[in-house]
Amino acid sequence: MASHGGPSSDWEVGEYVLESVLGSGSFAKVYRARHKETGDVFACKVIHLAAIDAKTRKTIESEVTVLKAINHPNIGETLIASENV
């Protein structure tokens, strides 16, 4: 999870470059992300922590836990969840 408002151009987060917004909601945006070395493309959800209350934060943390445990062909793999970007 990140608290950054988002890029006006490409934005680097660790090993990934966030390239364009795919969708947005009340407290998060989903970006098209590309791995710097492999070029693999992912979706990256950036959550604006300042825009959520404690209850919503707990819900998001639970969602991340569940998504990390799921192995299903129609659900993308959760690779990283971090507040330190």
Image (cartoon, helix red, strand yellow):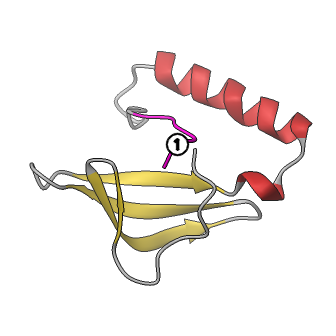
Which residue is painted at 58% across and 51% down in the image? Answer: 2
Which residue is painted at 69% across and 29% down in the image? Answer: 61
* Quarter occupied by residue 11: bottom left
* Quarter occupied by residue 48: bottom right
Q: 71 above or below 53? A: above
Query: Residue 26 at what x, y percent from top left?
Result: 77, 64
Q: Nearer the viewer, residue 30 or 84?
A: 84
Magenta stretch prevailing secondary structure? loop
Q: Quickly name the residue at label 1.
A: 84
Left or right: residue 6 compared with residue 75: right
The answer to if 60 sits in the magenta stretch is no
Query: Residue 83 at what x, y percent from top left?
Result: 58, 41
Query: Residue 8 at what x, y percent from top left?
Result: 46, 84
Left or right: residue 67 compared with residue 33: right
SS of the residue under disc 1: loop
Of all residues shown, which one is farthest toward the top?
Answer: 69
Q: Amino acid at mark 1?
A: Asn
Q: 48 above or below 65? A: below
Query: Residue 63 at what x, y percent from top left?
Result: 66, 30
Instruction: Report crowding for label 1: few under 14, some 14 to 19, many 20 or more residues within 10 A (C-alpha).
Output: few
Q: Tell me the magenta residue range.
A: 80-85
Which residue is painted at 55% across and 68% down in the image? Answer: 23
Q: 63 above or below 83? A: above
Left or right: residue 45 compared with residue 49: left
Which residue is painted at 42% across and 34% down in the image? Answer: 80
Of all residues shown, which one is farthest toward the front?
Answer: 84
The answer to if 82 sits in the magenta stretch is yes
